[in-house]
Image (cartoon, helix red, strand yellow):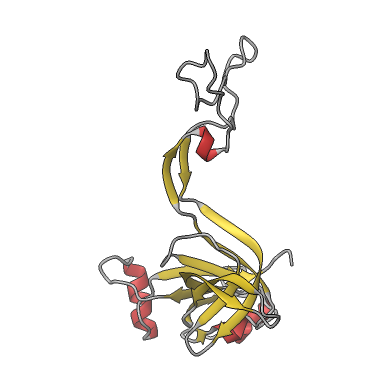
């Protein structure tokens, strides 16, 4: 399945530094990807009308899980997953998968692959324009009165007489779905279910991420 557009659900552990073959140090993000359980296989021949795999990962709590997910896990005889995601795949990949089976790192990725990582960025709360949009602010010379960190004018006078959509203004920053593309797989530790990705990926430590083959490699 190495060539299929199938991803896996993992957990970001943090960043470390490792040495490459040339002796140069580089920063990598360590993602724990425990074997993902195949909860459902969808095919074009079935009622769904498309090819996809529904995967589950992590250990969920029965009190917090939806009843439908709890019943499905009990029928399959697998542990209740904490995260459930669906991946569109080719017909060949859907035919190879079996409900109740598991997919590990080695089944999908190898060292040197380029991957896309999707996660929920860190929430920064309410921020002004200087932090949120990198505005320069105003000078602090004589005559600037309590206007150092303002965003400036947002008006358009009589025509069209309103603030335009998309204007850069203060507001909530972070805590949104972010994808980072074309990250290189530097190392894989199959025994400990770890994959080392070059550079940073979105999300805080312990947050769930989705790792899938790069679509623009």
Asked if residue 36 can be seen in this view, the reply is yes
Q: Relative to residue 157, is residue 53 depicted above or below?
A: below
Residue at the farthest right position: 217
Residue appearing at x 52%, y 31% in the figure: 169
Asked if residue 94 can be seen in this view, the reply is no
71 and 88: which one is in front? 88
124 and 5: which one is in front? 124
Residue appearing at x 62%, y 83% in the figure: 95
Residue 26: x and y, percent? 62, 71
Asked which quadrant contains residue 18, the reply is bottom right
In-image side of 185 versus 33 (left or right): right
Quadrant that contains the C terminus? bottom right
Q: Relative to residue 175, is residue 109 depicted above or below?
A: below
In-image side of 180 versus 62 (left or right): right
Residue 20: x and y, percent? 65, 79
Residue at the farthest left position: 63
Residue at the farthest front position: 142
Residue appearing at x 51%, y 16% in the figure: 144
Quadrant that contains the N terminus? bottom right
Residue at the farthest bottom position: 191
174 and 99: which one is in front? 174
Residue 135: x and y, percent? 58, 33
In-image side of 171 versus 211 (left or right): left
103 and 115: which one is in front? 115
Counting labels gives: 0
């Amino acid at each position: 399945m190495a060539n299929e557009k199938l991803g896996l659900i993992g957990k970001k552990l943090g960043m470390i530094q490792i040495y490459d073959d040339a002796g140069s140090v580089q920063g990598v993000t360590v993602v724990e990807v425990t074997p993902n359980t195949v909860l459902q296989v969808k095919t074009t021949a079935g009622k769904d009308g498309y090819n996809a795999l529904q995967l589950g990962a992590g250990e969920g709590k029965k009190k917090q899980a939806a009843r439908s997910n709890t019943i499905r896990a009990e029928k399959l005889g697998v542990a209740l997953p904490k995260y459930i995601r669906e991946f569109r795949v080719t017909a060949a990949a859907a035919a190879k998968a079996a409900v109740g089976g598991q997919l590990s790192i080695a089944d999908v990725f190898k060292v040197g692959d380029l991957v896309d990582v999707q996660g929920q960025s860190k929430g920064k709360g309410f921020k002004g324009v200087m932090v949120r949009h990198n505005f320069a602010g105003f000078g602090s010379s004589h005559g600037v009165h309590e206007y150092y960190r303002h965003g400036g004018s947002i008006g358009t006078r009589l025509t069209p007489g309103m603030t335009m959509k998309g204007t850069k203004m203060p507001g909530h920053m972070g805590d949104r779905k972010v994808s980072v593309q074309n990250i290189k797989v530097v190392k894989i530790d199959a025994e400990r279910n770890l994959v080392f990705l070059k550079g940073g990926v979105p999300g805080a430590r312990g947050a769930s991420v989705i790792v899938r083959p790069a679509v623009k490699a």
